[in-house]
Amino acid sequence: MKIILLVFLVFSSLLIQAQNPSSTQTDSSTIESKIYPGGREVKETVTKRDLVYYRFYRNNTPQVTSTATYNKSGRSIGVSKEYDDDGKLLYSIDHDHGSWNVANKSAYPFYSVQQQMKRKADELIAATYGREFLKNHVIWSVDGSYIYNQAESGNWSDSFSSKPTKFLFRYDVKLDKTHVYKELIQFELDQTGKFIPNEFEAVSGFEKLAQVPAQGFNLSYKAAIEATKQKSGIRNQPLQGFLKWESLKKPSFYNGHFRFYVPIKTGSVENLNPKGRSSVTDQFDVYSFNPWTGAFIEKKKMKAVRSWEENSGSSTGLMPTE
């Protein structure tokens, strides 16, 4: 896989194969280097900024073959680049603006097809929510988008032998300039650009609005936090909110809606088993808002479950209380 994020995650999951890991502390950053069977990765975490610089050297050569920048929560930011073994640029991805630019088009014979499908995907969002929403509230996730045909499947930036016939698009959604939420829009198109209903996955699709085009989200992050404090009576506890897609889990074009959640933890239930799997169930009052209008909708009971045992663990995120 040539996509930079996937390379990062794959090699991170294969730490056991890393040889001669090293870490160097400087006045401004921590530099970690690991050697794998396929090459060497270098991560530089900036101490006083939300930045992680990443480089990969395929086959452990002096020539860098991948560069990327992440924030400390793992979200790709800025421009990442992929090079061939001779140091020639293959492509770059602008994660802040959602674009994939191929330098060596001979290595990507279906680049024009993919670009055409990307335009159709953008038009579908604009037709559903309005061009203002497309311009100001979505960022195409190149890393999260995929292409398929009968014999191949891969990342958007993979080079295929045969023409792709199915396209999965994912878009990050912005509440405002500083609050961006990962891949809350995702859908598939066939080779003609027709929407494919998905009944097998909880795909974040589209919401049916009463009025189109929408002018974007009217909800203010700060206003939602303040409204939650007033409704809950909690004044001194720091609160955080996030945009959420509530899926109806139906194989249809309109299959859910956006909501803005502000959770307040109300308690925990522990189930500790030193010889087996343990769990902690955190309980929440969740204040839900309509991000299009800013209106408060409801308070509901939700929970999040963390479970673990030796060498493994998992968490559910917020889900309805049964």
Image (spheres, rainbow, N blue to C red):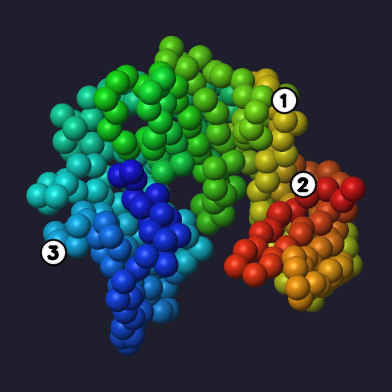
Residue at x-position 25% and y-position 60%: 39
Residue at x-position 54% and y-position 51%: 180
| Mark 1 → mark 2, Cα distance in angstroms | 23 Å
Q: Is residue 122 above or below residue 319?
A: above
Q: What residue is pinned by disc 2?
A: 289
Is label 3 in a helix, a strand or a loop? Answer: loop
Nearer to us of marks 1 and 2 is: 1
Residue type at numbered disc 1: Lys
In this rendering, would 7 be left or right of 62? right
Q: What residue is pinned by disc 3?
A: 62
Residue at x-position 81% and y-position 56%: 303
Residues at discs 3 and 2 in contact (Cβ within 8 Å): no
In this rendering, would 139 be left or right of 105? right
* Towards the viewer: 237 or 114: 114
Local packing at callout 2 (Cα closer than 10 Å; few below 14, some 14-19, many 20+) is many
Residue lying at the far left of the rendered structure: 86
**Residue 142's image quarter?**
top left
Residue type at numbered disc 3: Pro
Pointer 1 or 2: first along the chain: 1
Q: Where is residue 89 shown, x and y percent of the image?
A: 17, 46
Q: Where is residue 205 shown, x and y percent of the image?
A: 62, 30
Q: What residue is pinned by disc 1?
A: 250
